[in-house]
Amino acid sequence: MEARSAKAAEELVARDSFGELLARMTENAMALTKLGFDAMDLVVRNLRLAGRRDVTNLGRQLARTEDKLEMVLQEVERLRERVDGAGSRRAGSRAAGGRARRQQR
């Protein structure tokens, strides 16, 4: 009996229709899973709670804002270096001018 059952199961699994049936069952299971997750997202959204999609969107916005702030910080540092460089050149020229005036007296 066990041998006959094993042979019948092997014949069943060997057919192309079994593979097609298995693929369709898998597709249906995945579709039902997606529908369930979408329904839960709607429930959470209707309850006005932050859902997974909301948190993901906020994460993206935060990353973009951080990138923009990093660019602003780099520009501020460049401008600070320019100002510091121009200020030290002015201070150097003032010191040199003061020495020259003292030597003339």
Image (cartoon, helix red, strand yellow):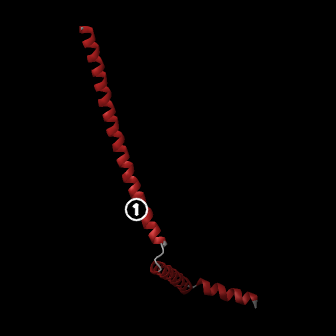
Q: Report crowding for label 1: few under 14, some 14 to 19, many 20 or more residues within 10 A (C-alpha).
A: few
Q: Residue furthest right?
A: 1
Q: Quadrant of residue 11?
A: bottom right
Determine the residue positioned at 39% across, 53% down: 67
Q: Secondary structure at mark 1?
A: helix
Which residue is at a point 23% across and 8% down the rendered structure image? 104
Q: Hey, which residue is sitting farthest bottom in the picture?
A: 1
14 vs 59, left or right, is: right
Who is closer to the viewer here, 45 or 35? 45
Q: How far across and how far down the image is residue 62, in percent?
A: 42, 59
Q: Looking at this view, is 37 or 100 the one in front? A: 100
Q: Residue furthest front?
A: 105
* Residue position for label 1: 61
Q: Is residue 32 above or below residue 96?
A: below
Q: Residue at x 39, y 49 (%)?
A: 70
Q: Position of residue 80 (x, y in %)?
A: 34, 38
- Compare residues 50 and 87 and report the one nearer the observer: 87
The amino acid sitting under disc 1 is Gln
For the C terminus, the quadrant is top left
How far across and down, in percent of the image, does residue 85 sit?
32, 30
Q: Is the N terminus in the top left, top right, bottom left or bottom right quadrant?
A: bottom right
User: How many marks are shown on the rendered structure?
Assistant: 1
- The residue at the point 40 percent across, 62 percent down is 61
Quarter of the image for residue 58 reads bottom left
Q: Is residue 25 left or right of residue 10?
A: left
